[in-house]
Image (cartoon, rainbow, N blue to C red):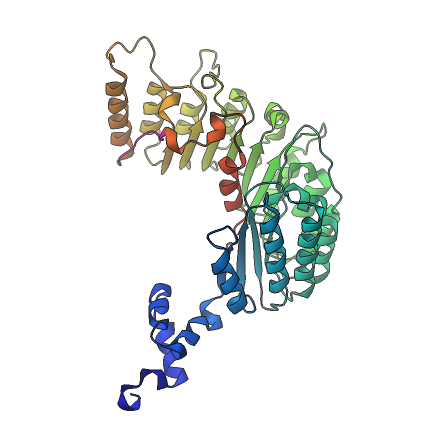
Amino acid sequence: MAAGGDWASLPSVVLEEIFSMLLPKDRINASSSCRRWREYLFLPQFWTVISFNLNYRGRLRTKFLSSKCAKFAKEATVEFNSTRGSQVWDCSRLLELLSRNRHLECISLRPSNCYFDGGSESLQSFLESLQLLIKRNKRLLHLSLGCTEILLHNSQELFNLLVKYHAPYLQSLHLATVKEDTSSYDVPYIGIDNFAAFANLRALSIDYDFVTPKFLAVLAHRDRGAPPLHSLCLHIHRVNQRQPTDSMWKEVLSANLNMELTLNLVHSVDGLQALLDVLKPSMPLTHYRQYFCGDVNVASLNMMSSLYYSTLSSLTIVEAINHQPINYTVNDTEDPFVMLAWRCTRLQSLKLIGMSLDQKDLVAIARLRSGLQQLTVPSCCVFWNEEDEDYYDEDDALVDLEYKISESLGRPWQPLSEFLIPPAVFYHDADADSAYMPELLKDQEWQRKS
């Protein structure tokens, strides 16, 4: 013990041991003891993972953290409003600061929107800082461009730098985008053959525009000793005439056993209409998401329940409500969502917003798949048939529905509150990005191999 109870004079090795045994919150409390203890709050081993938030409330904290910890963090996530020029500039400066960190392994960009605003100068500065970070870094394991289309259009230089400096190490690469206009856009050249250089790639997200026979051949014939790809996420916007065959997908799956496939459609009317051509029996479809595509493709849903009964884990559909929810036609056959619940034994999450759902079908879904961890349906999308004569009061009917579904799921269940429904579901002019960006960016999170 230090003489006279002078805690500030404890040996460095003792203070470091004390701080290493504390939880982050307790470290902060301990650091308020004195100036010397405060220094130990910022030891590099305590700040290997940092999330920088550049919004108004988080700006001062980020400025302080970046000055203290940006030089030794290993994983950095940068959240910013990409429609505000000031935050784009701040992000650019932060990336330049992070570029001096030779220990950085993971960088995840989390913009508020799929597009940048604020002028060409701020965007150019942003791109230059990002390129500088890739050039200076020694061993990048993960990079996410945050679904932004403009970064993909400037990605050839970024991609070449990744191949040049990080091909032997990169494990997780996320280039998939969300398009402002899915009916008309240019597809940049990034060099599909170069994907073969990423010998350790385990997770990849990319636009479906690049999924050609050549691309699947690269995934199917990776170098001997390369780890299998465990996650492939495809964003479907438009669908070309020539589709990869089922045999091509079979080769990919043979070379990448246990691979999980995610399909995301956002504002993609063309993608939804052509979905039957995209789906192949050998696809290991695990997650399907559809946002604001204008309809429900019943035939595709029936195909999913028939083909992917052993792989499909989650299904999300969020559509706009124009006067009333979408009334999809089932032609006197079983409801497609009921069939999914019956056939897909691994189904854990079902999120359905914007389509008209019969309360009897919802009860059937809960009974058939009682292990559902998430069943999200708003009350404004539930309807009762005229045959349901027992219900004279809408509130009573809703309470009875909650009871039946809760009983089947073995936990309390309530329909999604209208206050939690994304505003773009009801209002055409509302910002739709907030409805899907958080979920899509989850696909692009770094999953460190244990």
Up the image or down, 405 lies above or below 188; here it is above
Residue at 63% across, 46% down: 175
Q: Position of residue 117 (x, y in %)?
A: 64, 42
Residue at 42% across, 37% down: 346
Residue at 62% across, 28% down: 271
Residue 443 in the magenta stretch? The answer is: no
Front-most of residues 296 and 91: 91
Q: Position of residue 150 (x, y in %)?
A: 68, 43
- Left or right, 146 with reference to 316: right
The quarter in which the N terminus is drawn is: bottom left
- Left or right, 181 with reference to 358: right
Front-most of residues 323 and 252: 323
Front-most of residues 46 and 39: 39
Front-most of residues 80 and 254: 80
Q: Which residues are magenta?
A: 411-417
Q: Position of residue 249 (x, y in %)?
A: 63, 38
Q: For residue 33, what is the image quadrant? A: bottom left
Residue at 27% across, 90% down: 4
Residue 419: in sight, yes or no?
Answer: yes
Q: For residue 351, what is the image quadrant? A: top left
- Left or right, 166 with reference to 445: right
Q: Position of residue 309 (x, y in %)?
A: 46, 32
- Name the chief secondary structure element in magenta: loop
